[in-house]
């Protein structure tokens, strides 16, 4: 069923992909060329290209293989990946959000990293186990290896907190709302949200659902969207605009990291994000002006509520089967997961390395990285590794985008209304 939907999605995306291919994103034509799609990890696509190009030139100097780079915005990436998987036309190597791993694995369009293939990039034991576990369905060879490890944290503006008489960051959602109300004044807001970012919405839907005792899929992989716990989870997040009014209604339209800009410029005092410190520096916010803390929990979780405050987030790197330069692509994956590149790239992005050999490097000893590391080993959980996961992100994330738009117009949804929408979304899962 997933493959039928894949084909349908690909029809819509194929034209864009084909047009992009005219710009040079097809698999390299010879053993001396690779095409690489990278995700947006910094403040802009251009900044990502600026960060990556010196590393790619280093690879070319070592191997003689030239890498043609394209940084693809998150809003386009999934459809372009699915179109490339269906058409057999596209890049050699891609980096992808790890939550899509099982969905992309189901396309059978990517090289399997079985034990023999893993040996070519350093071996299975080289990778952090939790990160490698988020690279495909359990019991099957992964179709990617981890590149950057991430988790959500709560970022707060120290000066705004001090001026509002708030001594410490909130540890519960109830405290966050109370603090947010103190901070919302004079054109400034308590919490910044990326309300039109579909994947971001789905990530928070997962975490809140875990805290309310919900699940988005059962043990057999069947979707379970239509539950009271999931409705409660979504309502909690939407209510930051609809009821608590600690978030600017204009945030309902944000999908291009505008919430990060609002936090960096003091328009909002708190932000939920994945290792954003390097972006804040690039936006001229001094490291001493912001603090980082674990994402809050419910003060009184219901029966079945879990102590989860982030997904196991990260970026994986994968090779398309249609690549005409498989050996060169494997060499590139080995290069990107080498000790030197893991330190260089993760230090630049503020993420954590996905290999076990460099975790003790001083570059990862800052409070932000320590908080991320602590979250990953204690209170993070992986999103369901099922083929329909990407449909969950698209359907539920879009549903939440629409609810945020309603909230910005003064409409506060009830749990029953949200549950009706979840039922409709579940019926669309193919």
Image: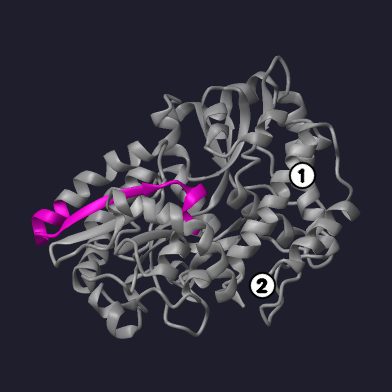
Drawn side of residue 360 relative to residue 275, left or right = left
Task: Identify the magenta region.
Answer: 58-79
Pick the residue in front: 354 or 27: 27
Pick the residue in front: 372 or 422: 422
Residue 172 visible, this angle: no
Drawn side of residue 333 relative to residue 414, left or right = left
User: What residue lies at 41% left-to-right and 30% top-to-bottom?
Assistant: 281
Is label 2 in a helix, a strand or a loop? loop
Pick the residue in front: 269 or 206: 206
Whether residue 179 is situated above or below residue 369 in the rendered picture: above
Task: Specify the quadrant that holds the C terminus.
Answer: bottom right
Residue 7 visible, this angle: yes
Q: Nearer the viewer, mark 2 or mark 1?
A: 2
- Does the stretch in magenta take in 60? yes
Q: Residue 248 appears at what percent x and percent y?
A: 70, 28
Query: Which residue is the site of mark 1?
Result: 403
């Amino acid at each position: 069923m997933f493959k039928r939907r894949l084909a349908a999605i690909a029809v819509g995306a194929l034209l864009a992909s084909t047009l992009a291919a005219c710009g040079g994103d097809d698999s390299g034509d010879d053993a001396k060329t690779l095409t690489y799609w990278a995700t947006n990890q910094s403040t802009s696509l251009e900044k990502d290209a600026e960060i990556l190009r010196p590393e790619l030139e280093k690879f070319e100097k070592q191997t003689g293989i030239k890498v043609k780079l394209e940084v693809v915005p998150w809003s386009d990436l999934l459809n372009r990946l699915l179109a490339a998987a269906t058409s057999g036309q596209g890049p050699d190597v891609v980096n992808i959000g790890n939550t899509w791993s099982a969905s992309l694995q189901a396309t059978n369009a990517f090289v399997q990293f079985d034990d023999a293939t893993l040996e070519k990039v350093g071996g299975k034991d080289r990778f952090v186990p939790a990160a490698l576990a988020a690279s495909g369905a359990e019991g099957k060879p992964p179709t990617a290896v981890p590149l950057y490890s991430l988790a959500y944290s709560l970022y707060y503006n120290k000066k705004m907190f001090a001026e509002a008489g708030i001594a410490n960051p909130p540890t519960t959602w109830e405290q966050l709302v109370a603090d947010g109300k103190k901070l919302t004044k004079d054109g400034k807001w308590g919490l910044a949200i990326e309300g039109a970012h579909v994947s971001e919405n789905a990530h928070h839907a997962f975490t809140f659902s875990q805290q309310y005792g919900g699940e988005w899929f059962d043990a057999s992989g069947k979707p379970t969207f239509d539950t009271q716990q999931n409705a409660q989870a979504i309502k909690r997040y939407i209510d930051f605009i609809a009821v608590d009014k600690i978030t600017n209604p204009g945030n309902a339209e944000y999908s291009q990291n505008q919430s990060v800009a609002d936090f960096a410029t003091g328009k909002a005092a708190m932000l939920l994000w994945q290792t954003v410190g390097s972006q804040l520096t690039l936006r001229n916010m001094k490291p001493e002006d912001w603090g980082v803390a674990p994402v809050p929990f419910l003060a009184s979780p219901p029966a079945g509520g879990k102590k989860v405050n982030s997904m196991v987030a990260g970026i994986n790197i994968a090779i398309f089967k249609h690549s005409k330069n498989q050996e060169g692509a494997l060499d590139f994956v080995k290069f990107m997961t080498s000790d030197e590149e893991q330190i260089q790239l993760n230090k630049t992005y503020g993420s954590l390395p996905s290999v076990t050999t460099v975790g003790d490097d001083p570059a990862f000893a800052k409070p932000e990285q320590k908080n991320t590391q602590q979250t990953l080993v204690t209170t993070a959980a992986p999103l369901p590794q099922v083929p329909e996961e990407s449909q969950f992100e698209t359907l539920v994330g879009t549903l939440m985008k629409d609810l945020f738009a309603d909230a910005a117009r003064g409409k506060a949804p009830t749990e029953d209304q949200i549950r009706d929408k979840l039922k409709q979304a579940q019926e669309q899962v193919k």
